[in-house]
């Protein structure tokens, strides 16, 4: 009788399933206060920083941040602020509307 071995499919490690997203979030001034503009996703940290700097010339407040996590499970680390321009939005990341 011949014995066959079944190979298990490789399982991605937790680190392999994580992805970092770079996002630029700007805010505009309205009569009722600050309004969050549509977020802009960047491909790299450098691109996010450049976009944030450019937007800071015409927006009240701009944040560039990175968020790492597993899109399949929805589990993400806390966002890391890469740059902040203009009026501060709250005292900490918990005050941000995202």
Image (cartoon, rainbow, N blue to C red):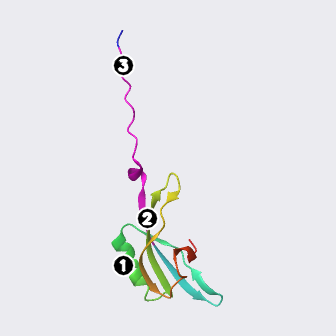
Q: Residues within 10 Å of mark 2 (few under 14, many from 20)?
A: some
Residue 35 at x, y = what percent? 59, 82
The residue stretch that appears in magenta: 3-23
Q: Secondary structure at mark 1?
A: helix
Report how far apart the C-alphas of labels 1 and 2 lie in the structure.
15 Å
Comes first in the chain, label 1 or label 2: 2
**Quadrant in the picture for residue 36:** bottom right
Report how far apart the C-alphas of labels 2 and 3 lie in the structure.
43 Å
Question: Looking at the figure, which quarter contains the N terminus?
Answer: top left
Image point (40%, 78%), residue name: 51
Residue 11, above or below 56: above
**Farthest residue, direction bottom:** 31
Q: Secondary structure at mark 2?
A: strand
**Farthest residue, direction front:** 91
Q: What residue sits right under mark 2 in the picture?
A: 21
Image point (43%, 64%), residue name: 21
Q: Nearer the viewer, residue 16 or 24?
A: 16
Residue 4, labelled with which disc? 3
Q: Secondary structure at mark 3?
A: loop
Residue 66, above or below 88: above
**Farthest residue, direction top:** 1
Residue 50, labelled with which disc? 1
Residue 87 at x, y = what percent? 50, 88
């Amino acid at each position: 009788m011949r014995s066959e071995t079944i190979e298990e499919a490789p399982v991605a490690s937790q680190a392999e399933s994580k992805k970092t997203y770079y996002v630029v979030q700007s805010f505009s001034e309205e009569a009722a206060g600050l309004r969050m503009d549509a977020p802009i996703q960047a491909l790299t940290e450098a691109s996010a920083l450049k976009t944030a700097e450019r937007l800071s010339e015409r927006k009240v407040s701009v944040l560039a941040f990175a968020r790492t996590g597993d899109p399949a499970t929805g589990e993400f680390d806390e966002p890391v602020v890469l740059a902040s321009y203009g009026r501060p939005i709250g005292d900490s990341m918990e005050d941000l509307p995202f």
